Image (cartoon, helix red, strand yellow):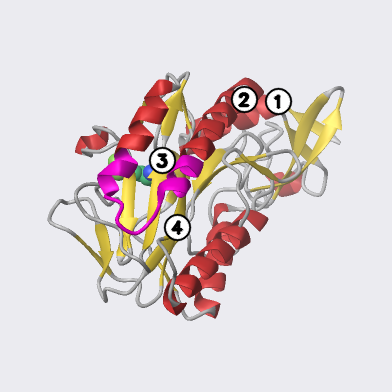
Amino acid sequence: MKYIDSPIIINALKKTYRHKGVNLMKIGKVGRNDPCPCGSGLKYKKCCFGKKVWISPKDVKIKYLQKYGIRLKSEKDIDGIRKTGELAIKTLTLVENIIRPGLKTDEINTLVHDFTTSKGAVCAPLNYRGFPKSVCVSINEEICHGFPGDRILHDGDIVNVDVTPIMNGYYADMSKTFFVGTPGQNAKKIVKITRECLKAGLKEVKPGNTVGDIGWAIQKCAESWKTSVVREFVGHGVGFDFHEPPQIPHYGKRKEGITLVPGMVFTIEPMINLGKKELYLLDNNWTAVTADKKLSAQFEQTIRVTETGHESLTPYDL
Ligand code: MF3
Ligand code: CO
Ligand code: CO
């Protein structure tokens, strides 16, 4: 066991190892001809190759910031985000209880806005890059970023409600797709598959896996049901800000992309279309709709990577 205290290239963090009260992380896949991470100046193959090499969490934090712009979260930060997450869950539960045919979507906006502010929190969507409302409400063929307004919910619709409160400076981002009245076959199908897709993505979240593993699992799930994954919108780091690095695509290849490490907090929020993946934007320049006008559903949770796997900071059953 060798403990390296200098910044190095991390290609694959395989597992953590406890040494003198700190969790060290094993480093794999430094190229044979790369400079040795121990700082000897020799090629890796002439030096520490084959030996176990470890990096401290402090160095991982520096490396992830410098290399990717990712701000890893401390336990205190996680507690803050989890508390905001609890508020998000309560908000969506209130919304769920008023969803019915005949409801005007602006009533969802009012409920979310008033409840959030009554708890001393702020609705992140309101005025975010010009977004005019406190919550996104996306119906049927709307993929995401729908404006609540005068539109009325009808029996058989599906409606995604996406909330992002900020409390004590911490963001949590969460959405669910609800049935309005009695769902038809297609509504039931796309909602069930989208839940399965988020579940499949979550299973991949553990240290040593990559961002690509998450997308790969989601894409495999969606395509196995002959549904499609939206490419233009992706999950994202969250917690200190609304949208932080890294991006979390809901499609991809196994082992590709950034390696997951403890302290990362990001959303997984697959948008799955019953028909084709193509979309266009409405002339409000925000709302995305399916090009073929078929249904689209979405579920979103804010997830943190733990030492052994993951924890949802906005948990609900899938
Ligand atoms: N909540 C959305 C997400 O999951 C972002 C909405 S941006 C807004 O990332 F401006 F429309 F609110
Ligand atoms: Co999000
Ligand atoms: Co969201």
Q: Secondary structure at mark 2?
A: helix
Q: Residue 35 versus residue 197: which sits nearer the camera?
A: 197
Q: Residue 204 versus residue 297: which sits nearer the camera?
A: 297
- Amino acid residing under circle 2: Asp
- Amino acid residing under circle 1: Asp
Tell me: is circle 2 under 8 Å from ligand 2.
no
Front tag of 3 and 2: 3
Kindly report the distance in space between the C-alpha atoms of the residues bearing marks 1 and 4: 50 Å
Mark 3 lies on residue: 163
Magenta stretch: dominant SS?
A: helix
Q: Secondary structure at mark 1?
A: loop
- Amino acid residing under circle 4: Phe
What residue span does the magenta drawing correspond to? Answer: 92-109
Residue drawn at point x = 28 percent, y = 49 percent: 105
Kindly report the distance in space between the C-alpha atoms of the residues bearing marks 3 and 2: 19 Å
- Amino acid residing under circle 3: Val
Residue 141 lies, with reference to residue 309, above or below; the image says below
Front tag of 3 and 1: 3
Horizontal relation, residue 313 to residue 148: left or right: right
Q: Which mark is residue 5?
A: 1
Q: Is residue 248 visible?
A: no
Mark 2 lies on residue: 79
Kindly report the distance in space between the C-alpha atoms of the residues bearing marks 4 and 2: 28 Å
If you read the primary sequence from the N terminus, does the residue marked by circle 2 or circle 1 appear first?
1
Kindly report the distance in space between the C-alpha atoms of the residues bearing marks 4 and 3: 14 Å
Determine the image quadrant of residue 59: top right
Tell me: is circle 3 under 8 Å from ligand 3.
yes
